[in-house]
Structure formats: structure tokens, C-alpha cells
Amino acid sequence: MSADVRPSSADDELQRLFGARLDALHASAAGSDPAPALVRALELRAFLALTEEQVARVRDRVHADTAPQRDMGELSADKLRVDAQWLQAALDARDGYRAALAELLRTMPAPAVFRPVRITQHRAVTTLPPTATPAITRTGSAATPGR
């Protein structure tokens, strides 16, 4: 997975269902004529990764603000209330993206459709003789039909 792709809780499931690593799935989705379900799944996965990162940021901020070594005088109920609202919003978004992704994966066509398949079309090459006219094997008049 490239450095600019955030991890998500859906990564293992997507890789299992589509039968390829995330970087290969992204390459397939960026190629010509990508499967619509793959494009949607990766789009939802990106939104999920972003909201999971937001959840982690708010969680880490609350943990830092309420750490045992922090001075109790620095603790602010108003700040914690705002963080709780932000956390709730991020969790709601995460749950929505997880539900949408689960529904898409449940209803999409069989994953075999998305596995990369290389099709090589073989061509038969023959060389015709210099003249393509049939040789006359006997001389004489042709037989008349019906005789």
C-alpha cells in the first residue's frame, strides 16, 4: 500500500473479497473500464479511512487532556463537551460508511468478475502459395449436369 493511502478497518475484507492487495485494487480501479462496484468500494473505503482517522484524533486529544499526569486545573468541561460532540459526529460518519460498504459488498456481483485476467488471443498465421488458383488436373470438357 502506498504511503498516501490511509489504512482502514475494511482493508482486510476488501483484499479477501476482491482477491488482490489494495495497491492492485487501486491500479485496477484507475485503469480503463474498471468495475463500478470496485470503484464504489474503494471510494467508500477512502471515506471510512478518513473518518476513522478523525475518530482517532479526537480520542487521542481526549486521552491527552484527561491523562493522569495532567494538572486537574487545565481540565475543561466545555472543551470535553465539544470533543464529545465531534467524536459522536465522527463515529456516526464511520458507522454510516461501514454500513454502506457492507451493503455494497453484500449486493455486488461475484468477486470473480474483479480478478485481473489476462487474455491472450492467439492468431494462426499461414502463408498461401504464390497463386491461389487451383491447378487443373485434367483436360477436356466438363461434365454437363444432369447427364
Image: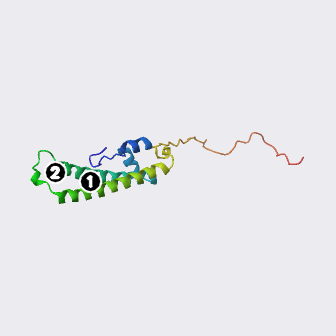
> Label 2 is placed on what type of residue?
Asp
Residue 31 visible here: no
> Label 1 is placed on what type of residue?
Gln
Q: CA distance from mark 1 to mark 2?
A: 17 Å
Q: Is residue 61 left or right of residue 98?
A: left
Name the residue located 30 percent from the left edge and 54 percent from the top edge.
51
Q: Position of residue 112 (x, y in %)?
A: 49, 43
Q: Residues within 10 Å of mark 1 (few under 14, many from 20)?
A: some
Residue 28 visible here: yes
Instruction: Residue under label 1, please give it.
Output: 54
Secondary structure state at the residue bearing disc 1: helix
Secondary structure state at the residue bearing disc 2: helix
Q: Position of residue 13 (x, y in %)?
A: 40, 43
Quadrant location, the N terminus: top left
Instruction: Residue under label 2, please give it.
Output: 65
Q: Is residue 103 left or right of residue 91?
A: right
Q: Nearer the viewer, residue 62 or 144?
A: 62
